[in-house]
Image (cartoon, helix red, strand yellow):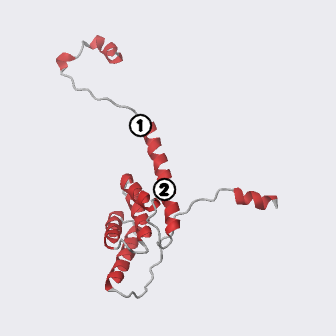
Amino acid sequence: MLSLLLSSCVAQPHRSPPVPKPTRVPDDTPARDAQERLLQEAHRAFSQERYRAAVLFFSRFAEVAPDSPRLAEARWWLGRAYEQIGDYRSAMEQYRTIAAGITGGQQDGTLYEGQALRRLDDLRQVSAEQRKGRAGQLALRLRLDRLPPIPALSAWFDE
């Protein structure tokens, strides 16, 4: 009984939402069918590690299908693609949009909202660690005639 209780207290690892399997569901409009194909192509590009192409496809989907029930999914994977190419600012923008609650009526909306909050926390921690470890550097531009003589140079730097 005690081991069962303790095992439920252990933090479970956070898993990203899986890439949805392509499904061929006939849609009632050609526009919805084209949107579905666009989303499938975006997922295919992401899984093939063509992240710049995935950014283009997911962005396009978000533009042309703002009322889609899969918009939160597209924005999540758009954020992940931005991360893969190193554009953390754009990734965080997507995660903030999801976390702000655009997920009302979205397929798996609360799942993506929770995952977006976790990614925002992770990226903030990485950003803080990078700023903390960054050495401060200063550049000076001086003419040679403005520098002190070589023996006095060390004291000049110390000042």
Cβ atoms under marks 2 and 1 closer than 8 Å: no
Q: Residue at x 44, y 69 (%)?
A: 73
Q: Nearer the viewer, mark 2 or mark 1?
A: 2
Residue 13 is labelled as none
The percent position of residue 127, horizontal first and vertical second, equals 44, 45
Answer few, some or many: residues within 10 Å of disc 1's Cα (few below 14, many 20 plus, some between 14 and 19).
Answer: few
Q: Secondary structure at mark 2?
A: helix
The percent position of residue 101, horizontal first and vertical second, equals 46, 63
The percent position of residue 33, horizontal first and vertical second, equals 35, 83
> In the depicted view, which residue is nearer to us: 42 or 94?
94
At label 1, which amino acid type do we have? Answer: Arg
- List the single residue furthest toward the right: 1
> In the depicted view, which residue is nearer to us: 158 or 57?
57
At label 2, which amino acid type do we have? Answer: Arg
Q: Quadrant of residue 141?
A: top left
Distance from the alpha carbon under mark 2 to that under mark 1: 22 Å
Quarter of the image where the C terminus is located: top left
Q: Which residue is mark 2?
A: 119
Q: Which residue is mark 1?
A: 134
Specify which label sits upstream in the sequence, 2 or 1: 2
Query: In this image, 73 relative to 61: left or right?
Result: right
Q: Secondary structure at mark 1?
A: loop
Q: Residue at x 68, y 56 (%)?
A: 10
Q: Residue at x 46, y 48 (%)?
A: 124
